[in-house]
Image: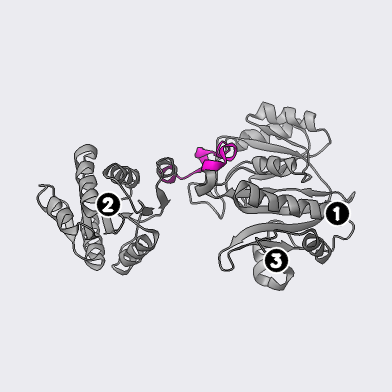
Amino acid sequence: MDIHEYQAKEILANLGVPIPKGALAYSPEQAAYRTQEIGGDRWVVKAQVHSGGRGKSGGIKVCSSDEEMSEIAESLLGKRLVTPQTDEKGKLINRLYVEEGLDIERELYLGLVMDRQSERVMLIASSSGGMDIEEVSESDPDSVLRLRIDPAVGMQSFQAREIAFSLGLGEQVNEVVKILMACYRVVVEYDASMVEINPLVVTSDKRILALDAKVSFDENALFRRPHISELRDKSQEDRRESYAMDRGLAYIGLDGSVGCIVNGAGLAMASMDMIKLAGGSPANFLDIGGGASPQRVIKAFRAVLNDENVRVILVNIFAGINRCDWIAEGVLLAFETLEIKIPVVVRLSGTNVELGQKMLRESGTDLLTADSLYDAANLAVKTCNELQA
């Protein structure tokens, strides 16, 4: 789960990370008033959306008067910001963050992410931060510092000091140590999957501040972090994914036309690959889990049907913990309650497969069945192509 910049900064500030003066605004008048509250003669207004690349896309602007601030806020609020990290629809801007203008001497990058290969938290740092950090990592990878943190002992102060000196921050070494230790605390104590400060700036008066911050959290751990769950902004989420998440379904929306309902992440990935091999395109990744009840199957159908681009639904179940008759019951209940008007291809295998297949055959519905994933994927793609012809 992603949160807004101002929310990430609040979390970091509560742990001792220095941030610039700033305040939230929901209207042009409020944005103009924030300039008086913050003080100074120059301010930065930032669109609060769940996306990077805001600066290059016009989502971050500098102004020098409250009238100019009001005009900029008017031009941003209610609009959709399209960045390299969004789709063509962009993200809705419904709040702004007004911040003091700074005289910046240096920009650096700090980030902590989960390294799946080593199964550890990895600290990434660079003496070149800001909007072009992606290009820097590609053109000059040696300039990027990496440190894998042993989970048994966590990040140590000496490691943070080494990073500070490697970045040329000898004068601010103590501040950098506090910042890095605070970021690591967010990962461990808040179940964050990523903490990023880009840029971490050194000002002309030698202050070191987190000018921008981004934090993402493990959605599977939100049940034990209710104060983090409250930071969720559904207006920034894919409508399909938001619906599925609220119902406990592992769902990722894609741009294809074959909707997928599968149990098990590995089988779901294999099903998507098979659809592509057959010449089609999956509309989603959806894992209903190992013990899916008929009611859960209905929820999965609703989630898939929320996507207007879906032309055919492929149900692919390999029952181990699950049972094929449960899945068949769920499919038939979905036909009764949801008035499904698009073709549905069902492939069942595993526990109680004969009973499940019998239930489908004798149901009187017009759903399509297949015995193998290969046949099911090809049948789904063929049916989809016929509908679009």
Under circle 1, the secondary element is helix
The residue pinned by badge 3 equals: 147
Q: Which of 191 and 253 is in front in this view?
A: 191
Of the numbered discs 1 and 2, the one sitting upstream in the chain is 1
| Residue 263 in picture, x, y percent from top left | 33, 56
Circle 2 Cα neighbour tier, 10 Å, few/some/many (<14 / 14–19 / ≥20): many
- Reply above or below: 121 against 213: below
Q: Nearer the viewer, residue 108 or 267?
A: 267
Amino acid type of the residue tagged 3 in the rendering? Leu
Name the side, left or right, on which 303 lies relative to 116: left
| Residue 264 in picture, x, y percent from top left | 36, 58
Amino acid type of the residue tagged 2 in the rendering? Arg
Q: Distance between the residues labelled 1 and 2?
A: 58 Å
- Reply above or below: 50 against 155: above
Numbered label attached to residue 311: 2
Q: Nearer the viewer, residue 287 or 344?
A: 287
Main SS, magenta residues: helix
Residue, x 78% and y 42% (percent of image)? Answer: 20
Numbered label attached to residue 320: none
Numbered label attached to residue 174: 1
Residue, x 66% and y 29% (percent of image)? Answer: 28
